[in-house]
Image (spheres, grey):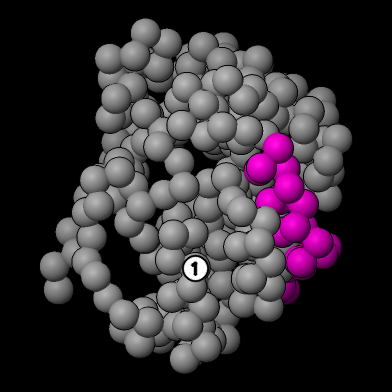
Amino acid sequence: MWEEPCISGNKGSGAVFFSGCTLRCIFCQNYKISAENYGKTINAQRLADEFKKLESLGVHNINFVSPTPYTVEIIKALEIYKPKIPIVYNCSGYENTETIKALNGYVDIYLPDLKYSDNELAKSYSNAPNYVEIAKNAIAEMISQTGENLFDEIGMMKKGVIIRHLVLPSHTKNSIGVIDIIKENFPQALVSLMCQYIPMYKAKTHLKLSRKITLREYEKVKNYLFMSGLDGFVQELNSADEKYIPKWNYNE
């Protein structure tokens, strides 16, 4: 229920979380599945069955979270069963353009992160060389596939791109740089500015990342976003709460 309003709506988004990630963020809140391989092995048929199960619950969409390492199997599953509701590809932004091209026709909504405007930060915090250029190319391909953002009669997104950015403590300059990149390259995309950062994983002992962001930091970035003229969403500062972090348990 805690995605953007046009994704979660009042029925929720049918999230399917995948183990593994294209990044190795030292501050990852989902590190158990992204870095420690916590999960359950299933095949494409079982995955397709999960799509059906979620769809039957009345969710607004099927939301693939960190799906990139499994793109081939996801496509197989969608060939077995393509839900009648939108497919959301919720990813890090650090994507091979050829992978995104392979998803053309299967994905309706892209929900990429744009974490950095500074390649050195990306390499240091996420082990992601050339992050800015790679993410820009991937997002450009996403937008070329989806075209203009489309919504249904109750405001739920049917097709489009929402670019997410998480504000990090001590790094408002990086966030302002990300807003500049979006304005210059992707002004048609919606922006989702997030302040849910909590020091987790290796960030707990990091000099600059071992605290939540301050109200002053968030207001600085939020005001810059408002002045940019970009459209989108902003979180409330109280979203930085561990109660919103999933408790992983895949037992049936």
Residue at 25% in and 52% down: 37
When asked about the image quadrant of residue 153, the answer is bottom right
Q: Crowding at label 1, few (<14), some or many (≥20) Cα neighbours within 10 Å?
A: some
Q: Tell me where the magenta segment starts and ends, as one range.
A: 133-155
Residue 34 percent across, percent down from the top left? 34, 47
When asked about the image quadrant of residue 229, the answer is top right
Looking at the image, the residue that sits furthest to the top is 207
Q: Is residue 193 above or below residue 81?
A: above
Would you say residue 141 sits in the magenta stretch?
Answer: yes
Prevailing secondary structure of the magenta residues: helix
Q: Is residue 124 among the parts visible in the rendering?
A: yes
Q: Is residue 53 among the parts visible in the rendering?
A: no
When asked about the image quadrant of residue 161, the answer is bottom right
Residue 138 percent across, percent down from the top left? 69, 51
Left or right of residue 167: residue 162: right
Q: How many circles with numbers are drawn on the protein?
A: 1
226 and 141: which one is in front? 141
Identify the secondary structure beneath mark 1. Answer: helix
Q: Amino acid at mark 1?
A: Thr
Q: Is residue 200 above or below residue 120?
A: below
Q: Is residue 99 above or below residue 33?
A: below
Residue at 31% in and 80% down: 43
Looking at the image, the residue that sits furthest to the left is 251
Q: Is residue 230 above or below residue 71?
A: above
Q: To which residue does mark 1 refer?
A: 71
Residue at 14% in and 73% down: 252
Would you say residue 191 sits in the magenta stretch?
Answer: no
Residue at 83% in and 41% down: 185
Residue 145 percent across, percent down from the top left? 76, 66
